[in-house]
Image (cartoon, helix red, strand yellow):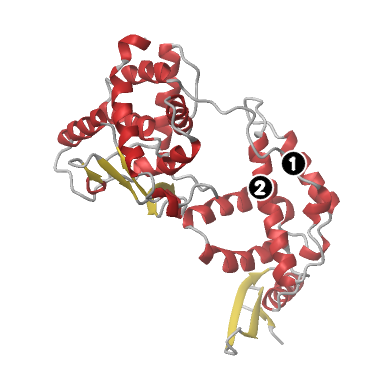
Amino acid sequence: MSVYKEAKTNTWRVVYRYVDWTGEKKQTQKRGFKTKREAQAWEREQMNLRGANLEMTFESFIQLYEQDIRPRVKESTWANKENVIQTKLLPYFGKLKMCNITPQQIIAWQNEMINYRDEKGNPYSQVYLRNLHSHLSAIFNHAVKFYDLRSNPCTKAGTMGKKKAREMLYWTKEEYLLFAEEMMLNPDLYYAFEMLYWCGIRKGEMLALTPADFDLNAGTVSITKTYYRKNKQDVITAPKTEKSIRVLKMPQFLVEEVKDYMKMQYALEPNQRLFLISDGKLQRAMTNGSAAVGIKKIRVHDLRHSHVSLLANMGFNLFEVGIRMGHENEQVTAQYAHMFPGRQVEMANRLDVERWDKERTL
């Protein structure tokens, strides 16, 4: 018998023995069950889990899903999945058996998400709702493909939300220059926003930059990593995709600004992060700064859209812009990038002209 009552604590203990995938005999145990029934239920769940029996709960299947998926994705990608799983999926499906979850239960969960309102009365965005559904559907697809679940209940339930936002917001050059002037009293913010707008890099790519990433003689910056916070810790990983690894030519005025900013830093080390700014501080600065100068409010990521819009208005085509932006696009691949070396230089040179052509546009 593997379920025992411990006299000293008057609780139940389970010892579960099993053979792992290598054929090695192993043992796990858990103490502190108040009743024998609870202890036996835990033992049955362990048997289902080890045998990949979909009589197991959704919560237990997530353990298998993590074992299978986590080693194959970036840590930041898993962190995003884990947050959705813990906050949006386990509270609803955690105790249900995988094989018994129905399309009707999926629809009920969808309706909960659709009807949610925060303290200000705001619902989840259509894009976020679509993202939540995609995470749940991916878990069931994994169960279908690798653990013989008969069907994915999300397929019958249908999707929720939309793939794309209704509108892509961005600032024109004129709007950005008004905002940038407002930021000049705070050098950390000003130079961070200059990198974001004039290079079109992602926020995490900017926050990961170190002096070693710049070749100020050549006027280039190498994008080789990205930054994010997890459990109150700084995390540096590879960029979003392989195509995100790139070398950008900077306009000359920005080269000079980076030189000036580095000189402001005390004892700056080559591999020390240059911009020590939180996500929240960046967004608050954009919110307050845009209100101060009377322009529309946008997100930090929308500065990337703003850079694309600027280049498009300057006459560069989508293919050329895609290379500079590091877009993951079937039509913009790394093997074609070497065919356009002069366009990067031209982009930087023309951005240099655009920056100082302020009197004409303001």
Point out residue 45 in the picture as x, y percentages from the top left corner: 72, 72
- Under tag 1, what secondary structure? loop
Residue at which label 1 appears: 160
Pinpoint residue 297: horizontal percent, then vertical percent: 50, 21
Taking depth in this image into account, of 177 and 179 the one nearest to the observer is: 177
Does 153 appear above or below 347? below
Decide: is 210 above or below 75: above
Closer to us: mark 2 or mark 1?
1
Query: Residue 217 in the image: x percent, y percent?
Result: 17, 41
- Amino acid type, label 2: Lys
Residue 73 seen in this snapshot: yes
Q: Which residue is at 28% across, 24% downward?
A: 186
Q: Amino acid at mark 1?
A: Met
The structure residue drawn at horizontal position 49% and vertical position 29%, both measured from the top left corner, is 299
Residue 55: percent from left, percent from top: 78, 70
> Which residue lies at the image location 46% right of the left edge and 15% below the top edge?
295
Q: From the image, tell me which residue sits under label 2.
A: 88
Disc 2 and disc 1: Cα gap in Å?
A: 14 Å
Mark found first going from the N terminus, 2 or 1: 2
| Classed neighbour count for the residue bearing mark 1: other residues with Cα under 10 Å, few (<14), some (14–19), many (≥20) | many
In terms of image quadrants, where is residue 54? bottom right
* Res 349 → quadrant: top left
Q: Quadrant of the N terminus?
A: bottom right
Tell me: residue 308, above or below residue 15: above
Please name the residue shown 60% across and 78% down the image: 29
In the drawing, does residue 151 fall left or right of residue 183? right
Question: 154 or 6: which is nearer to us?
Answer: 154
The quarter of the displayed image where residue 345 is located: top left
Position of 34 compared to 184: left or right?
right
Q: In this image, 69 relative to 290: left or right?
A: right
Q: Can the viewer see residue 6 in this picture? A: no
